[in-house]
Amino acid sequence: MSGFSARKEAGVTKSMHMGICVKGYLKKPLSEMKNVFFNNNTGEFLSTQEARDYLLDELSKGHLVIPIGQCPDWDYVHGCPGHVVENAGKEAQPC
Ligand SMILES: [Zn+2]
């Protein structure tokens, strides 16, 4: 499942939704924003300038990390709090 991984923590396996560091992406060259973000309504990729505007918009709302995929408990500062799951998976990468 895309944007979804799991890690073990104190004997409990948690699944973690992955996120994008807004500030980290804004520091990248515009060329690296090509074909990364897309419009949820049209399904089309945002242009590099639209992607940058989108990230600046998120940052202005105080959103430091934005989710990849659907996380029901997403925290826009700390990311996914983790969800306890039955089956173990691969390690999650911190933001
Ligand atoms: Zn989550």
Image (tube, helix red, strand yellow):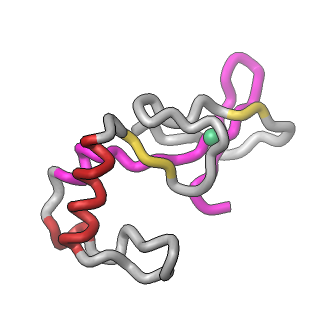
Q: Quadrant of ligand 1?
A: top right
Q: Is residue 12 above or below residue 61?
A: above
Q: Residue furthest right?
A: 86
Image point 80% across, 37% down: which residue?
A: 85
* Magenta-drawn stretch contains 61: no
69 relative to 58, above or below: below
Q: What number of labels is visible?
A: 0
Q: Residue at x 27, y 66 (%)?
A: 51
**Magenta stretch holds residue 23:** yes
Is 57 located above or below residue 44 in the figure?
Answer: above
Q: Quadrant of the N terminus?
A: bottom right
Q: Position of residue 19 (x, y in %)?
A: 46, 47
Q: Nearer the viewer, residue 61 or 78?
A: 61
- Farthest residue, direction top: 10
Q: Position of 40 compared to 36: left or right? A: right
Residue drawn at the location 15% of the way across and 51% of the way down: 27
Q: Quick one: 94 or 26, which is closer to the camera?
A: 26
Q: Quadrant of residue 45?
A: bottom left
Q: Quadrant of the C terminus?
A: top left
Give percent across and percent down for residue 52: 22, 62
In depth, the one of 91 and 37 nearer the eye is 37
Q: Is residue 72 left or right of residue 92?
A: right
Which residue occupies the foreground of this view, 34 or 70? 70
Give the magenta-colored segment's residue range.
1-26
| Picture coordinates of residue 11, whole percent (x, y) | 76, 20
9 relative position to 48: left or right: right
Image quadrant assignment for residue 64: top left
Where is residue 15? Give x, y as percent: 68, 40
